[in-house]
Image (cartoon, rainbow, N blue to C red):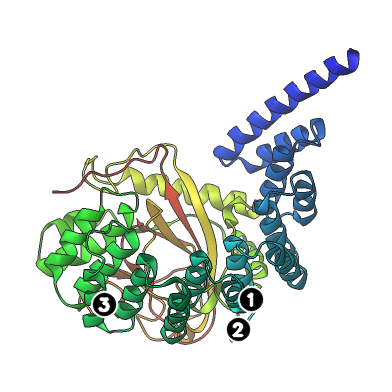
């Protein structure tokens, strides 16, 4: 009886500690969340959820977590997330071979594990295995040819590196086994558009008329812009806005409005308060310490295939949530600058993607570091899942090394070059150590290549809570 009562009391205490940990984690108070989860785990060591969350929190903080994930997996062998994250933790802790072996064994037992295949291919790519980084996708798809997800995953891995010939060959092989499915047809339309076969792209998209797939919507917008039909691109973007992937439409809508000379283009991204640079007030000693820690995190041979970085690397996980004390000081300084930026925004506008949402309870949605080397730059892109995005300059080459202006500059407003739309950037900002540039996440942005040296920055997205959604502007 006494043991039963003691066990029940321990379970209650563990539940309370878990609830406290989750509240701290939601508010991104990582130290307090760790302490509460550690207590919960000590009170309920066999609780598989607590074991997994503790491992995940330690991993997010940049602390050793592989063994914790192994324990969580032992408690819950069906938890594939624990296996995947254990592999990523092993790689982060200096054992990439062990990480890959773990995933290979798991995929051998479950060849349809798409997430495991994705992570394994990504590990091979950043390790420099560019020639056959996709070999596990190939083996799984050919061993299980009736599973469309495997073919599409393989196709996606090749599409990310813009290898259109190999991507098309995968679609050909898939069609031999599956026939012509809507998903394969969509993928072919995407390849046609991105590789310049615009007439073929249009014909394929016509065969997909009526589809609400965001992938198809984006292909239609990109084709319309490539063909110079801004009205069609605008209409496609407006139709996409109310849907679950509507945030992706704003960047294209901005381009269409500028092409049409519509004043809504300036309404969307032309206000000077939207894109500004701020001095965050960190000392030279803080910046030097931050640069040293960030350099130690850039261990990949090359950037992840899906990222915008060229001739450089980008870190994984959210660096501003890490355990090193410098990140706490830096985060406080950066968020103070964010609050000042937000205070200077125009009044609430229920139609506007930036101005329509609540501006309190701001939080970091993701943070990373980019380290560019000679010839390095970021291709033009946007952050559809963010609200505000940023670039904080930690270390830069001297002017002569970086190159003549505008080498290394941040630019915004010009659409991606591959769309062939002749619109200049709305503006450029020269990088300066200790300076934070903030801008709406939907704005097209990129950087001008540097000639030589190291361009090291820290970037993050900010979202308000609750996360509102803008109404249609028309």
Count of marks, rendered view: 3
Of badges 1 and 3, the one in the foreground is 3
Which residue is found at the position 20% from the left and 73% from the top?
Answer: 225
Q: Is mark 2 on a helix, strand or loop?
A: loop
Check if mark 1's residue and mark 3's residue have beta carbons within 8 Å: no
Quarter that holds the N terminus: top right
Crowdedness near tag 2: few (<14), some (14–19) or many (≥20) residues, C-alpha within 10 Å? few
Residue positioned 24% across, 39% down in the render:
348
In space, the residues marked 2 and 3 are separated at their CA atoms by 28 Å
The residue to which callout 2 is attached is: 132
Label 2 vs label 3, nearer the camera: 3
Measured as percent of width and height from the top left, residue 307 is found at 48, 70
Is there a contact, CB below 8 Å, between mark 2 and mark 1? yes
Q: How crowded is mark 1: few (under 14 residues within 10 Å), some or many (20 or more)?
A: many
**Is residue 61 at least partly visible in the picture?**
no
Which of 244/374 is in front? 244
**Picture quadrant of residue 470:** top left
Compared to 82, does 209 lie above or below? below
Closer to the chain start, of discs 2 and 3, is: 2
Nearest the viewer among 288 and 223 is 223
Specify which label sits upstream in the sequence, 2 or 1.
1
List x then y, in percent, for residue 17: 70, 29
Q: Where is residue 58 in the image (x, y as percent from the top left)?
A: 70, 49
Residue name at image x 72 percent, y 57 percent: 86
The residue lying furthest to the top in this view is: 1
Q: Please give left or right for residue 69 compared with residue 462 in the image.
A: right
Question: Which quarter of the figure has residue 226?
Answer: bottom left
**Residue closer to the observer: 147 or 204:** 147
Residue matched to label 1: 124
Q: Mark 3 points at which residue?
A: 201
């Amino acid at each position: 009886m006494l043991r039963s009562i003691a066990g029940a009391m321990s379970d209650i205490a563990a539940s309370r500690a878990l609830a406290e940990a989750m509240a701290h984690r939601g508010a991104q108070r990582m130290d307090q969340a760790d302490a509460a989860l550690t207590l919960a785990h000590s009170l309920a060591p066999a609780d598989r959820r607590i074991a997994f969350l503790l491992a995940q929190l330690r991993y997010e903080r940049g602390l050793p977590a592989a063994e914790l994930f192994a324990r969580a997996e032992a408690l819950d062998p069906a938890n594939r997330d624990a296996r995947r994250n254990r592999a990523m933790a092993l790689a982060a802790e200096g054992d990439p071979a062990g990480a890959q072996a773990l995933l290979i064994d798991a995929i051998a037992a479950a060849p349809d594990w798409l997430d495991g295949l994705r992570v394994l291919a990504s590990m091979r790519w950043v390790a420099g295995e560019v020639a056959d980084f996709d070999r596990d996708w190939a083996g799984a798809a050919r061993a299980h040819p009736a599973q469309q997800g495997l073919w599409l995953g393989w196709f996606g891995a090749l599409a990310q590196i813009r290898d259109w010939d190999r991507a098309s060959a995968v679609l050909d092989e898939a069609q031999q086994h599956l026939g012509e499915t809507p998903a394969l047809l969509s993928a072919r339309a995407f390849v046609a558009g991105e590789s310049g076969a615009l007439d073929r792209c249009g014909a394929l998209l016509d065969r997909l008329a009526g589809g609400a797939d965001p992938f198809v919507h984006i292909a239609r917008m990109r084709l319309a812009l490539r063909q110079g039909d801004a009205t069609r691109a605008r209409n496609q973007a407006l139709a996409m806005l109310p849907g679950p992937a509507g945030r992706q439409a704003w960047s294209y809508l901005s381009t269409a409005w500028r092409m049409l000379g519509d004043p809504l283009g300036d309404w969307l991204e032309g206000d000077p308060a939207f894109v500004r640079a701020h001095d965050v007030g960190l000392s030279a000693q803080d910046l030097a310490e931050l640069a040293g820690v960030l350099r130690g995190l850039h261990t990949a041979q090359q950037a992840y295939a899906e990222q915008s970085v060229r001739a450089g690397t980008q870190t994984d996980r959210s660096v501003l949530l890490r355990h090193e004390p410098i990140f706490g000081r830096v985060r406080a300084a950066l968020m103070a600058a964010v609050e000042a930026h937000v205070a200077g925004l125009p009044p609430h506008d229920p139609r506007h993607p930036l101005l329509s949402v609540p501006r309190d309870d701001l939080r970091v949605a993701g943070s990373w570091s980019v380290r560019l080397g000679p010839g390095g730059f970021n291709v033009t892109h946007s952050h559809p899942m963010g609200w505000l995005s940023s670039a904080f300059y930690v270390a830069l080459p001297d002017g002569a090394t970086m190159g003549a202006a505008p080498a290394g500059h941040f630019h915004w407003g010009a659409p991606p070059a591959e769309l062939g739309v002749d619109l200049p950037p709305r503006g450029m900002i020269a990088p300066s150590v200790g300076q934070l540039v903030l801008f709406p996440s939907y704005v097209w942005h990129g950087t001008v290549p540097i000639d030589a040296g190291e361009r090291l920055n820290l970037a993050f997205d900010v979202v308000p809570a609750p996360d509102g959604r803008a109404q249609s502007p028309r």
